[in-house]
Structure formats: C-alpha cells, structure tokens
Image: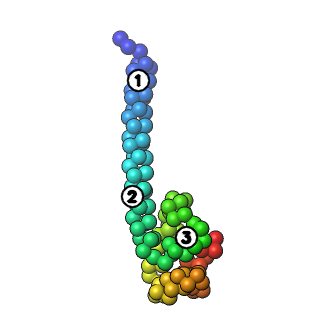
Amino acid sequence: MPDIGLVAAAVIALALTVLMALLARAIHANLRRGAAWREQALERLEALPLAEALAGRGVDLREWLHTTPINTLEGALRACDGCQAKADCEAGLAAGRGPLPGCPNAPLLRA
C-alpha cells in the first residue's frame, strides 16, 4: 500500500501544475486583449489632434500607448475627443503653434 504522504504530495504537485497552466493561459489571454485594446486606442489617437501634439514633442505613439497607464490613456483620448476646440487645435498644430492654451491634455503634454 502506498504511503499516504507520497500520494498527498503527488496530488498537490498535480494540482499546482494545473494551476500554473491555467495561470499561464490567463496571462497570455490578458496580454492579447491588452495588445488589441492598444491597437484600437492607436486608431482612435491617430484621429485626434492629441496624436499630432504628442508627435510634435517627439513622442513615439506606440511606445506612449505601451508605457502609459490605461486610465491615463483613456482619459486623454476622451478629453481630446470631447473637446469643443478640436478644429482650432488642429489649425494651431498645423501652423506650428502647438496645442491651445486651454487644452484639457495640457498637463499631459507638458510632462
């Protein structure tokens, strides 16, 4: 008859192996979802004056999307998208004047 300690160790080892496999699968799925979200965010960003303002500061947009916390990204995208002065901002950026003084993302652009 097998030793109960040996059986318990084998069951624990099997359980830990299964948990590690499930964890690896979950991490991989999360990384894929994050990459897909950032691709969508890049499309949204490129349609906004914020992209030009960041690029004018020499910021690589893909790197910025990868290194900036999601809450900050989403807030910046929403602020720019909802801004009533987008046309004026785009004109100012095209003329080389930078973003408007009242830009909701001014603190982000100064950082």
Q: Amino acid at mark 1?
A: Ala
Residue at horizontal 42%, vertical 56%? 35
Q: Which mark is residue 36?
A: 2
Q: Which mark is residue 10?
A: 1
Residue 88 drawn at (x, y percent): 50, 88
For the residue pair 74 and 63, the one nearer the viewer reads as 63
Residue at horizontal 58%, vertical 81%? 96
Label 3 or label 2, whichever comes before in sequence order: 2
Residue at horizontal 43%, vertical 28%? 13
Label 1 or label 2, whichever comes before in sequence order: 1
Secondary structure found at label 3 = helix
Secondary structure found at label 2 = helix
Residue 76 drawn at (x, y percent): 50, 73
Q: Are marks 3 and 2 in contact (CB under 8 Å)?
A: no
- Residue linked to disc 3: 55
Q: Nearer the viewer, mark 1 or mark 2?
A: 2
How far is disc 3 from disc 1 in space, using C-alphas?
Answer: 56 Å
